[in-house]
Image (spheres, rainbow, N blue to C red):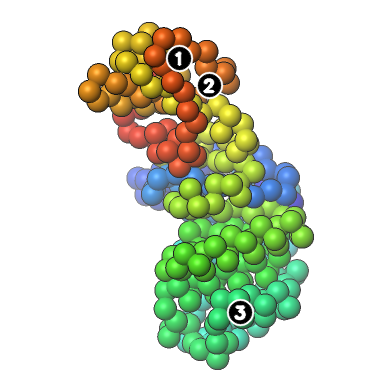
Amino acid sequence: MTIVAEALKKEYKSTKALNNIDIRITEPKIYGLLGRNGAGKTTFMQLLAGYDRPSSGNLLVNGMQPFDNRSVTENVCLIKEADNFKKDLTIQQVLKISSMLYTNWDNELAADLLEGFDLDKKRRVKNLSKGMESALGIIVGLASKAPLTMLDEPYIGLDAASRAYFYEVLLEEYQNHPRIIILSTHLIDEVSNLFEEVIIFNKGSILLHKSAEELRAESFCISGPAAQVKAYTDGKHVIKEKSFAGTTEAFLLTAEEPQLTGDLTVSGVALQDMMVHLTEKRGVRA
């Protein structure tokens, strides 16, 4: 499975949802698709799933345009945050229809996940709680075994135990049957250890695309007396600064291992914090 986007744009009237997206994804990995609300993440996934066509530019999945292309869509599964299934269908009917939509559908896995999430297959979608509906979406997403599986905030309403179960099964299924899994989430701290690559969208563009390992290794927080921090960070790529009571914290994105002197200290930065700092409207200092 390959994904190639070149100068990809999507506009809705006067709104630029995506602006000159260039990306190439070829390896089976778990990709973290991150960004603030309205950054363009959902629009990008909907284009990949063939729900809509680009305004301009190129988007190819396995060398083919996904829009209105059954050869692509039977190998692509997108589970949205909500409204994935018709409300009058039973869970059993949802799974039956899904088994006809996806070439690699796994009935045994679907049954196991149904039991794991404790769902009654006779219940109708309209009678499910938000957490139950999210669990059904996760079941379809994982049991589809689609070579491109996208999960857009799939856990809304799930309690902590159910989310932990989801993360466990997601990793297990990926290890047993590698595929491209794109997970868009705001609960970054909970799932960051699953990510092999991180893609950060901001205002319709790709702000950053790195391996998760590389991003962690290049994210630092330098703290200490304000004057010393300022002297050390002068000319460096400062993502954000915070000062209080004469002490300053500076968040850096750099491939150079910090060499500190004086009263300065260094620590790593959580992936969620780095994403927040990178996408703040105040911008950065280089």
Which amino acid type is shown beneath numbered disc 2? Answer: Thr
Q: CA distance from mark 1 to mark 2?
A: 8 Å
Looking at this view, is 113 or 11 the one in front? 113
Q: CA distance from mark 3 to mark 1?
A: 51 Å
Which amino acid type is shown beneath numbered disc 3? Answer: Leu
Vertical relation: 109 (above or below) 203: below
Please report the residue visible at 62 percent of the width from the left and 41 percent of the height from the top.
Answer: 197
Residue 248 visible in the snapshot: yes
Please report the residue visible at 56 percent of the width from the left and 33 percent of the height from the top.
Answer: 216
Label 1–label 2 contact, CB within 8 A? yes
Residue 67 visible in the snapshot: no
| Residue behind mark 2 | 254
Looking at this view, is 23 or 105 the one in front? 105
- Quadrant the C terminus occupies: top left
Disc 1: CA contacts within 10 A as few (<14), some (14-19) or many (>=20):
few
Q: Is residue 17 left or right of residue 6?
A: left
Q: Secondary structure at mark 2?
A: loop
Please report the residue visible at 25 percent of the width from the left and 19 percent of the height from the top.
Answer: 246
Which amino acid type is shown beneath numbered disc 1? Answer: Lys
The answer to which of marks 3 and 1 sits earlier in the sequence is: 3
Q: Residue furthest left?
A: 245
Number of callouts: 3
Q: Residue furthest front?
A: 263
Q: Which mark is residue 236?
A: 1
| Residue behind mark 3 | 114
Q: Secondary structure at mark 3?
A: helix
Please report the residue visible at 75 percent of the width from the left and 69 percent of the height from the top.
Answer: 104
Q: CA distance from mark 3 to mark 2?
A: 45 Å
The answer to which of marks 3 and 2 sits earlier in the sequence is: 3
Image coordinates of residue 228 in percent, x first then y, are 36, 11
Disc 3: CA contacts within 10 A as few (<14), some (14-19) or many (>=20):
many
Q: Tell me which corner region of the image, top left, top right, bottom left or bottom right, holds residue 5.
A: top right
